[in-house]
Amino acid sequence: MQDVIRINQEDNVAVALRSIEKGESLVIGGSSLTTLEEIPQGHKVALKPVKAGEEVIKYGFRIGYAKENIDRGQWVHVHNIKTGLGDLLTYEYEPVSGNLPEGGHAVFQGFRRTDGKAGVRNEIWIIPTVGCVNSIAKALEKEAQKLVGGSLEEVIAFPHPYGCSQMGDDQEHTRTVLADMIRHPNAGGVLVLGLGCENSNIPVLKEYIGEYDEQRVKFLQCQDVEDEQETAMALLEELAVYAKGFQREPIDAGELVIGMKCGGSDGLSGITANPTVGAFSDLLISKGGTTILTEVPEMFGAETILMNRCESRELFHKTVDLINDFKNYFTSHNQTIYENPSPGNKKGGISTLEDKSLGCTQKSGSAPVKGVLSYGEQVKNKGLNLLSAPGNDLVASTALAVSGAQIVLFTTGRGTPFASPVPTVKISSNSSLAGKKNNWIDFNAGRMVEDKSKEELAQELFDYVLEVASGRKVKAEEAGFHDMAIFKQGVTL
């Protein structure tokens, strides 16, 4: 195993792949270097002297400026480096092309819905229209487990605190997200559970849902019936009969839509886990599939890489708006645009937002950008898509699911147990985390700095995703975890 890695030949820092003691002698690119202080795993060491005000380079790009003179062999982190980012920027379209691997054919065993979409799970979802009926939804989830069997895999309630006392975009987001959930192909049946007096009531929500299969989607307004529990269970029994009529069948991998997100990142995330997901994305796209990248605030500082991979000038301008609209969202709430990375990120070795963003965007691989989606918008174009959503893990992962992702890939260097509405694959950036939190981690990309190449790991991850799409449960599913979080921006009445 290597001691340190220099990611790009232009870099003036390297990343420690293990904790390195003060005074250790290292060999990097044929040159020896003695560390002047301890360098924790995932953190950076200076490969050459960097004067105060000079650029610190990692991934071949600037990740900030030195706050003071930094000596060769010195630890480089938040104490001696600062962000170089400003606020709103002007961008020029300088298109670049990427190389995808050879295509080929692959299949998974999925569920074909009557609207033609493909699902990777056959579940009944209970969707409350308003937080007031959350407790009823959870009680129904518990009672309805007796219906599980055959091809019906689970009954899941998705409580949330919204649906009333909302205004403007918040109300629109709630209605759009709930409608997207109701239409999601991983659900073989859906019970929409309303109260009756809420803003986003069932009659209003039906306008957002559009056409639907009346056998697959049932509605209940609790204020309209004497015993909502009894009435709801009768509807769930009907949905169970319908859902059990679906069976897994071979479906081309080109119909997979995979969301990509990272959280609890460390200094190895941009070296192991995120590049593995990027290579996976290219592999899936080469077979006709679709990936979605989100968490816009963690594109700041690396956005030009994505902008210049846009397939057209129109998509370039949409990506510019994607970035600047999120910056304006921050400033409209009197918040600092670059209040990032998090304490956990810093402990793991990430020093600035540029450092974090350049690692984050590794998940996009090299494919051209084919679509740019607003929050809650359904994916339409095959290939790589960018989605407007914040960096918050639960909110962003939910956003990926409602835009059409049947599975979410979540890379992490620190670990997290959360889930989303769809199977959420946890990918560790280091082997220590994979061993310590085996009950959370599904795939260990930390092997890239041990005994595996990026291409080998990408193929392993691709094969694993096909298994998950064919019914293999991820760790969060085995634990019974299912989360949903809607993006809230404005006033609560």
Image: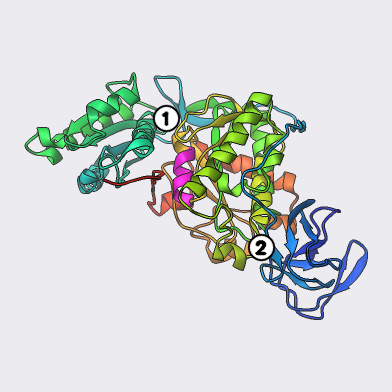
**Residue 212 appears anywhere in the view:** yes
Q: Is residue 121 magenta?
A: no
Of residue 19 and residue 380, the one placed in the foreground of this image is: 380
Q: Tell me the CA gap for discs 2 and 1.
A: 40 Å
Q: Look at mark 1 in the image and give the residue it sits on.
A: 185
Question: SS at mark 2?
Answer: loop
Decide: is 396 above or below 123: below
Q: Residue furthest left?
A: 226
Direction from residue 204 to residue 95 in the image, left or right: right
Camera-near label (2 vs 1) is 2
| Residue 150 in view in this figure | no
> Residue at 24% of width from left, 35% of height from top?
199
> Which of disc 1 and disc 2 is earlier in sequence?
1
Residue 25, given in percent of the width and then of the height, sits at: 86, 76
Left or right relative to 49: residue 307: left
Residue segment shown in magenta:
393-400
Q: Residues within 10 Å of mark 1 (few under 14, many from 20)?
A: many
Asked if residue 214 is positioned above or below residue 473 in the image, the reply reads above
Badge 1 amino acid: Pro
Q: Which residue is mark 2?
A: 351
Q: Is residue 416 above or below residue 360?
A: below
Name the chief secondary structure element in magenta: helix
Marks 2/1 in contact by CB < 8 Å: the verdict is no
Q: Secondary structure at mark 1?
A: loop
Q: Where is residue 57, by image quadrant?
A: bottom right
Q: Is residue 396 magenta?
A: yes
